[in-house]
């Protein structure tokens, strides 16, 4: 295949696609809005699943490089109530199939595997329009444009490419979170470090919860989850770090101090993360010369599957294009039908983990899910 592929978005899905295309000798260019690879934090730990994320890295020829990024012991899970009582403590016994790796390092591994110049940084897309015959023009904030013969939208929840294919837009899920970090926790935040333990902590109550995990270098990464209407975070200045910290901390009044410190002692300003989703079963009819992958195609509430699916989408699309070198439309159709089926299977298998964590019976509902016992409120 000699038709160059234009990819919008240098997330894990878009970069996996670019890498698999490179493995098969297919030219690709990735346009990314961020000005540089290290312009912002890339999230926390990511557990790679055998039949999706890990399979995608295998298709990309990066399995050995990935193994070097794995943080041992992070597949430990702990559930607490608001008073800091440990209700469930599952150590990492080394037999898990979903190893944890830092998302930022995983992204950098993919970037390092691509030819220099593959990713064009600082290209924020402002508009995409069809030119006919499967070609599309992409306009950037710096007033430059590019014409794509084959356009892939790997540009996330607020995709600029999606409107070419679908009128569906993301809707607020009813939950938002404040993201915080505690650095050098073993020395500076010992009580919180002991509470989080070796891997992930779920400290939960009805309508709210603290989801924290231990990253490398003694960093504790936390999401303070709150079930709130959308106007809860639109009626004040969320960029005011002190105001946001105080507002979130009030929601956890009376909780154990080692838990509330995950919010109040943050070494970075809190970042508000409202959660949006696309409707279940989101799909579209074939449009020549363009398709989507990852969150641009099937945005759901966090369930441990999103990044894995995006990487699998990228890898399978790359393989489809390599398998149909003279018929890109056949490749795009094969990709979409397989992707729709994968997303539907994940939706059908969704046990409501994210909602259960902070439902009216939390934390007992999560305990029941993890242990198979009946929920005891």
Image (cartoon, helix red, strand yellow):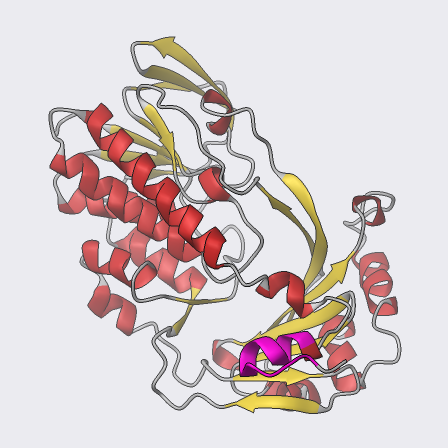
Magenta portion: prevailing SS class: helix
Instruction: Name the outermost residue toward the top.
Output: 132
Please, is residue 251 above or below residue 144 in the view?
A: below
371 drawn magenta: yes
Q: Is residue 51 left or right of residue 347?
A: left
Q: Answer yes or no: is residue 271 visible.
A: no
Quarter of the figure with the N terminus: top left
Q: Position of residue 360 (x, y in %)?
A: 77, 68
User: Which image quarter: residue 214?
Assistant: bottom right
User: Which image quarter: residue 253?
Assistant: bottom right
Q: How many marks?
A: 0
Please, is residue 199 above or below residue 321 in the view?
A: below
Q: Answer yes or no: is residue 77 visible.
A: yes
- Residue at horizontal 39 percent and vertical 78 percent from the top: 71
Q: Position of residue 178 (x, y in %)?
A: 71, 60
Q: Position of residue 173 (x, y in %)?
A: 68, 48
- Residue at horizontal 28 percent and vertical 44 percent from the top: 17
Instruction: Name the outermost residue toward the front.
Output: 374
316 drawn magenta: no
> Camera-side residue: 83 or 360?
360
Q: Position of residue 312 (x, y in %)?
A: 32, 51
Quarter of the figure with the C terminus: bottom right
- Residue at horizontal 82 percent and vertical 81 percent from the top: 255
- Residue at horizontal 51 percent and vertical 33 percent from the top: 159
Looking at the rendering, the stretch of residues picked out in magenta corresponds to: 365-375
Q: Is residue 277 left or right of residue 268?
A: left
Q: Is residue 137 left or right of residue 347?
A: left
């Amino acid at each position: 295949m000699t038709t160059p592929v234009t990819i919008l978005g240098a997330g894990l899905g878009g970069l996996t696609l670019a890498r698999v295309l490179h493995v098969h000798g297919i030219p690709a260019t990735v346009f990314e809005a961020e000005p540089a690879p290290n312009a912002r934090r890339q999230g926390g730990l990511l557990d790679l699943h055998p039949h999706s994320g890990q399979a995608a890295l295998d298709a990309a020829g990066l399995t050995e490089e990935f193994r070097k990024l794995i943080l041992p012991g992070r597949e430990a899970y702990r559930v607490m109530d608001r008073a800091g009582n440990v209700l469930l403590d599952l150590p990492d016994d080394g037999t898990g199939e979903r190893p944890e790796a830092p998302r930022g390092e995983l992204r950098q591994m993919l970037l390092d595997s691509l030819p220099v110049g593959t990713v064009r940084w600082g290209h924020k897309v402002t508009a995409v329009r069809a030119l006919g015959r499967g070609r599309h023009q992409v306009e950037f904030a710096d007033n430059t444009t590019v014409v794509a013969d084959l356009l892939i939208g790997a540009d996330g929840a607020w995709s600029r490419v999606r409107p070419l294919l679908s009128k569906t837009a993301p809707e607020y899920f009813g939950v938002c979170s404040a993201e915080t970090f505690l650095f050098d926790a073993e020395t500076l935040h010992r009580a919180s470090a002991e509470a989080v333990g070796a891997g992930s902590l779920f400290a939960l109550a009805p309508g709210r919860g603290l989801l924290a995990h231990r990253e490398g270098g003694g960093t504790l990464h936390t999401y303070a989850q709150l079930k709130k209407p959308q106007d809860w975070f639109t009626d004040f200045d969320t960029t005011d770090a002190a105001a946001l910290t105080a507002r979130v901390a009030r929601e956890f009044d009376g909780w154990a101090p080692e838990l509330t410190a995950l919010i109040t002692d943050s070494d970075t300003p809190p970042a508000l993360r409202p959660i949006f989703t696309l409707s279940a079963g989101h799909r579209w009819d074939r449009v020549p010369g363009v398709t989507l992958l990852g969150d641009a195609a099937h945005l759901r509430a966090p369930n441990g599957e999103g990044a894995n699916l995006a990487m699998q989408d990228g890898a399978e699309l790359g393989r489809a294009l390599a398998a149909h070198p003279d018929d890109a439309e056949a490749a795009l159709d094969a990709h979409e039908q397989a992707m729709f089926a994968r997303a539907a299977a994940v939706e059908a298998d969704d046990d409501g983990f994210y909602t259960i964590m902070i439902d009216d019976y939390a934390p007992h509902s999560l305990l029941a899910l993890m242990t198979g016992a009946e929920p005891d409120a």
